[in-house]
Amino acid sequence: MKTSINFKAAKSDSEAHSFRKKTFDYIRKDLSSKNKYWSEEKISERLHKIESYCKEKSGRKLQKNAMPIREAVVVIKEDTTMQDLHQLSKQLEEELQIRIFQIAIHKDEGHYDKETKEWKPNYHAHLVADWQDLQTGKTLKHQSFHYSKMQDITAECLGMERGIEGSKGRLEAIEFKIQKKEEELLALDKKINVVKSELSSKKFEDLIVKESDFLGFKKIKTDLTLGNYEKAFKTYNIQLSKNKKELEFKNKLITELQSKNFDLKKEISILKNKLSIVLSNGNIYSSEKIKYLDSVKDTLIKTLQFEKTKLPQLFIGSNEMLIAKINDVCKQVSNDNNIPFSSFEEIFKDSESISQILSLLNFGNSEINYNSEQIPLLQKKKQRRL
């Protein structure tokens, strides 16, 4: 499974679609609860800031044909998390100056297969970006190699250039599915052979209509016999055509599964090699750990900011109430992104990280004191679940 990213000018109804502010007839409402959302600010607010900054920096108004806010639809996997997309956003900003300020993960769109009637989900994410060059105030200017780099960054951050789908368990499930499809294929072959053998069997003798004449001799009734043959051939042709289509579909499906299976085996092998290198080299292990914890902290901060924007009153109160709210958000981030609780413990052991998180939330150290000793709140919740 491969991914791609292609930014275009954001549409006027972008937020209505991305954040499901309207009802659309092409979505499955029963799956909408699986969608995930994050926003730094509204498009109208960001556009106003861009226009003001352009006038301040260049002395001129933003050009009418400029596209300062752009949106991309990115193909994702079923298990792609908001943390993955925040990491992608970070890389786009660091390497291409593209600043993502809205993300929506959609898992309620797709279609039903015409032949199998099976639901085929269209997992994707909407990324809305600020396309302003902070040095000039004008829109960013990218060359063709920048767009190529954009594809590389996306594939790398989402782990999709080689079709990552999951663990060994997932691989075994696909192998089992291939086995089942191959069994169905053999059954279809048998069915077609049965129909073909019936065409040449003596059963067709039963279709011949004979009638005795006045001398007692049996004579074939041509019109009735031809009618029987015509009905029989029509029935068999319909069955053969149906079997042929089904056979073609199964062959196609097996080919796709085998290709997917090959990619999974290749990716698992690469991941195992990477794991061996990381575990055997202390410096690499430390580097990977720092990189991962930075990603967790970034996701936590952005989620806290988003929650405060939606319901600012929840972040007003005593120290204990604020600590409880932060712990609740940690739990949410952990569940949504498959992050172990130990990662949050590591982050909150660092006083600098605590100060950074609180200052970004505009709490200030004088308003709330949060330290690693308060992390057991998370652990208590974890133990109660066990």
Image: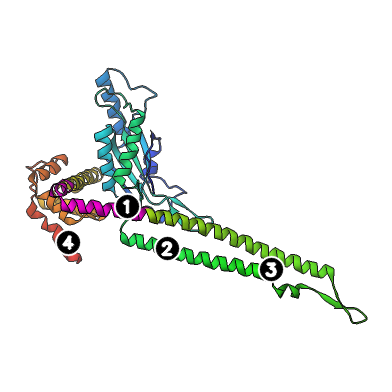
- Going by the numbered disc 4, the residue's amino acid type is Lys
Q: Distance between the residues labelled 1 and 4?
A: 36 Å
As drawn, the label of residue 360 is none
Highlighted range, magenta: 263-289
Checking the image for residue 199, the label placed there is: 3
Q: Mark 4 points at which residue?
A: 381
The amino acid type of the residue labelled 2 equals: Lys
The residue located at (52%, 66%) in the rendering is 186
Residue closer to the observer: 67 or 274: 274
Q: Residue furthest right?
A: 214
Residue 148 picture quarter: top left
Mark 4 to mark 2 CA distance (whole Å): 38 Å
Tell me, yes or no, whether the highlighted magenta stretch contains residue 337.
Answer: no
- Upstream in sequence: badge 1 or badge 2: 2
Q: How far apart are marks 1 and 3 (CA)?
A: 49 Å
Q: Percent position (x, y) of residue 306?
A: 24, 44
Residue 177 tag number: 2
**Amino acid of disc 1:** Glu
Check residue 281 for magenta coloring.
yes
Provide the major secondary structure of the magenta segment.
Answer: helix
